[in-house]
Amino acid sequence: MNDLSNMPDTQVGKPGVPLIRSGALQLQLIERHAETADITSYRFSVSREDGERFRHHPGQAISLRLTLDGEELVRTFTIASAPDHNASLTLTIKAGPHAYGTRYMADRLQPGDRLQARGPFGQFSLVHTPQQPLLLLGAGSGLTPMMSMLRWLAARSEATDVVLLQLARTPADLLFTDELDAIDRAMPGLCHIDAVTEVPPGEAWRGPRGLLSRQSLRALVPDLARRTVFCCGPQGFMDSVQAIYRAEGGDLQRFLTETFGSPSLANAKTAQTPVALEVAEGASAVQLDQHRFPIAAGQTIVDAAAASGLRIPTACKEGQCGTCRVKLIEGEVDMQQQGGLSAREEQQGYILSCCSTARGDLILSRKG
């Protein structure tokens, strides 16, 4: 097992970009305000449990631990604010009508409340693609990582060539309109476009409207193919934009999306009843609470579970966020974590299933 608690900062991505180690965080809500009918911004003070100053790259995320009715939930959110020196961060979060954790935050979280968290993590950041023309494309609350990047550029008075395209359902669902107008006026290299899919009867709207298509995206961003694209929103939306980008001649290595987890996990069902699958003779088996499934040599626990139709929630799939933490009751694993567990959590027997492979049969538990 790897413990990164004493590892100095190293380089990641492009030369000159420091690795910011993920770690345990303490948050306290300072203030909150409604952005739209179902999206709220929460500003927290933040401190690292290891005593280091909290830092993050624009576009990175953190995971929150929420306790609801005795059950611990882990939810991952992109930081919407730019990196600063004030030991604070802002999360802008949508709470749908049938949401659980985010609905709890919208209904119950008040200034002064404290939360445990872990982070930052993720490679979805423009610091890895410096001095390139950009398209920052966000749909709904998928605008939040774009705002972190744009706020960072504005604070640095960067002259980067940037198109920011925000898509929302209606004009009332658009985010940060006044702030974006102010940044647009202050940044000569910025082109800010708001587009909506529908306009309520009797409401005035002069901007683009309708579903995004190859023709409409080409009209809004004629030089799309030469730009590095950061895209965040519903999976179907991101897939559609990627197809348009490719058709326009864009290099898919320069099309970057924010996704928490992997396609195999996104397509796997969360088991509502115990899973018990046959394990071939000589193969290894994982017992996770009431679920039993086979695991191949070199296969991570998360991927083995997904192949069996069982979803273990994960956000980064890089051993950084701690979302997929489970307790090792019996057996041995090889774990290549990158700060998603503290040394104390490892001593207590926790492992991260996204970056752990089995050395034999395992018995695991999601309960502490």
Image (cartoon, rainbow, N blue to C red):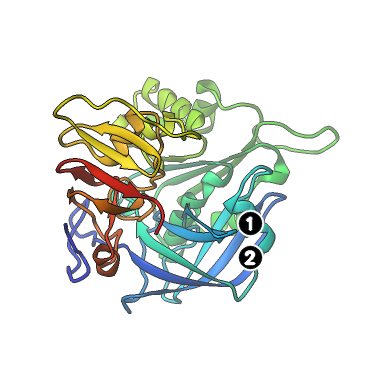
Q: Amino acid at mark 1?
A: Tyr
Given contact means CB atoms under 8 Å apart, are the residues at marks 2 and 1 in contact? yes
Q: Earlier in the sequence, mark 2 or mark 1?
A: 1
Residue 299 in picture, x, y percent from top left: 21, 36
- Along the viewing direction, whichever of 73 and 337 lies nearer the viewer: 73
**Quarter of the figure with residue 204:** top right
| Residue at position x 53%, y 47% in the image | 143
| Residue at position x 36%, y 24% in the image | 246
Is residue 306 left or right of 238 when viewed as pictured?
Answer: left
In the displayed orientation, state which residue is furthest to the bottom.
51
Answer yes or no: is residue 77 visible: yes
Say what secondary structure mark 1 lies in.
helix
Q: Can you say whether 198 is above or below 181 in the image?
A: above
Residue receiving disc 1: 104
Residue receiving disc 2: 109
Residue 267 in picture, x, y percent from top left: 42, 28
**Quarter of the figure with residue 245:** top left
- Along the viewing direction, whichever of 156 and 52 lies nearer the viewer: 52
Q: Marks 2/1: CA distance?
A: 7 Å
Answer yes or no: is residue 227 visible: no
Image quadrant for the C terminus? bottom left
Residue 128 in picture, x, y percent from top left: 28, 51
